[in-house]
Image (cartoon, rainbow, N blue to C red):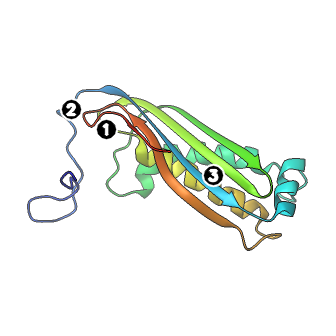
Amino acid sequence: MSELTHFDAQGHAAMVDVSAKPETARSATACARVVMQPETLALIQTGTAKKGDVLGVARLAGIMAAKRTADLIPLCHPLPISSVTVELEPHAPGTVEISATVRTTGRTGVEMEALMAASVAALTVYDMVKAVDRGMRIEGLRVVAKSGGKSGDFTQE
């Protein structure tokens, strides 16, 4: 395991100095899922949820969240994001699978931005249909791929 980078010599939290790192193309993909009752998924798929287009609103929320990551995670660098895609796929009997991919050219990676996009998209799905299904679960939030930078590429299933 590599050394933790967000602490200074005295053990205090510190933002990593990335000024000497070269700019490279970087990307990260994070996934999550929302598990719900089959009837709740049917409302989402038919577009009859009272709050409207659940998947469309969740996609926009995920994109917006990626752009605001540095505002919420204290030691994240604000990054010039080149691209954010958020995909939401309903799967019977009662799951929405979420995948968020973020790209930039910069000195640090976009894993946190991808995680933020996937998690906020999942939270938005929950928020939009919680009135009919309080037992929903958000599961499996994780980075499944990253590329670029000194540490190289990473992929997991």
List the residue tagged with mark 3.
121
Seen from the viewer's position, the closer of residues 86 and 136 is: 136
Asked which secondary structure carries label 3, the reply is helix
N-terminal of the two: label 2 or label 3? 2
* Left or right of 76 in this view: 88: right
Q: Which mark is residue 108?
A: 1
Measured in 3D between alpha carbons, the distance from the residue under mark 1 to the one under mark 3, in whole angstroms, is 23 Å
Q: Amino acid at mark 2?
A: Lys
* Left or right of 132 in this view: 127: left
List the residue tagged with mark 2.
21
Residue 68 seen in the figure: no
* Residue 38 spot, x, y in % from top left: 83, 61
Asked which secondary structure carries label 1, the reply is loop
User: Residue at left 80%, top 52%?
Assistant: 92
Q: Residues within 10 Å of mark 3 (few under 14, many from 20)?
A: many
Q: Which mark is residue 136?
A: none
